[in-house]
Amino acid sequence: MQNTNKTVIKSMKLLHLFRTNPTLTLNEMVDAAGLPKTSVHRMVTSLEEAGLLQRDGAGSYKLGLLFLEFGQLVTERMDLRKIALPYMKELRDQIGEAVNLTIKDQSEALYIEKLDTTHPVRLFTKVGRRSPLYAGACSRIILAHMAEEDVETYLQEQKLTAYGNGTITDAAKLRDILSDSRKKGIAISRSELENGTTSVAAPIFDFKSEIAGGLSIAGPSERFSDDKIQQMIDQLKQASYEISKELGYKEPHL
């Protein structure tokens, strides 16, 4: 395992060379990286087979088209944040509570934007925070709208650990809640990631009608009565729908 890690690190060192040089020969990589030619040749061959490097007719190498795909994925994430921000600000100003934007990152939800509440008492959430897909409305709304086979695989592989008094750790109950969230287009959590907190979330869809992220309102439970939550839902769903439309979503508004 240690040798594998070292090989990965050395391969990344080679790829970093292309940040300042669009094309490099094998000998140029050997000189710049300070590694044995046999090692560089072996790593370059593997990187080429993986689509991370591409060799031209002159024998020089450049970054492969796979990086273009990776770059597009990153751009799409940044576009989501840029598109969502005005709607998040409007929603926060209307309701006065914190508004969060999350996306799926492997088996977790990742917070890519947040706007704080106007109240002096607030939750601690930051951009870059991660949470399991099964816990918290902002995470679970994403899980609820994933492909059914992906949801089932996740539930079979994921240990349901409690983070707060309200964390759902029973798989059967979780399946029922996910089904309900999918039908209603809304997820509500109480004390799931942190005790004494409540969150309401709606899905954001992309041009393929696939889940792109989640938009949520969160705060201390004392400010989230049942009546207040019902008032929030329409505004939240409208905001998530407008964001989805800007991402190319064509389905009718529910």
Image (spheres, rainbow, N blue to C red):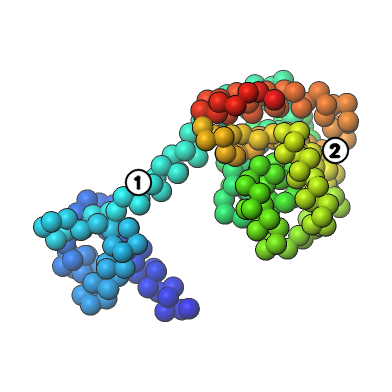
Is residue 85 at all visible to an observer of this figure?
no
Relative to 193, does residue 161 appear above or below in the rendering?
below
* Quadrant (top left/top right/bottom left/bottom right) for the C terminus: top right
Residue pictured at 47% horizontal, 38% vertical = 76
- Pinpoint residue 177: horizontal percent, then vertical percent: 80, 45
Residue pointed to by mark 2: 221
Q: Which mark is residue 68?
A: 1
Q: Is residue 50 left or right of residue 131?
A: left
Extreme residue in the left direction: 58
Q: Secondary structure at mark 2?
A: helix
- Pinpoint residue 101: horizontal percent, then vertical percent: 62, 37
- Pinpoint residue 14: horizontal percent, then vertical percent: 29, 63
The crowding category of the residue bearing disc 2, from other C-alpha atoms within 10 Å (few below 14, some 14 to 19, many at least 20), is: some
Q: Which mark is residue 31?
A: none
Residue pictured at 42% horizontal, 75% vertical = 4
Q: Is residue 18 left or right of residue 249?
A: left
Residue pictured at 57% horizontal, 50% vertical = 105
Mark 2 and mark 1 in contact (Cβ < 8 Å)? no
Q: Secondary structure at mark 1?
A: helix
Relative to 107, does residue 227 appear above or below in the rendering?
above
Residue pictured at 29% horizontal, 53% vertical = 64
Relative to 191, does residue 187 appear above or below in the rendering?
above
Q: Is residue 180 left or right of residue 146?
A: right
- Pinpoint residue 183: horizontal percent, then vertical percent: 75, 36
Q: How many marks?
A: 2
Is residue 242 at all visible to an observer of this figure?
yes
Tell me the kind of residue under disc 1: Leu
CA separation, marks 1 and 2?
44 Å
Tell me the kind of residue under disc 2: Ser
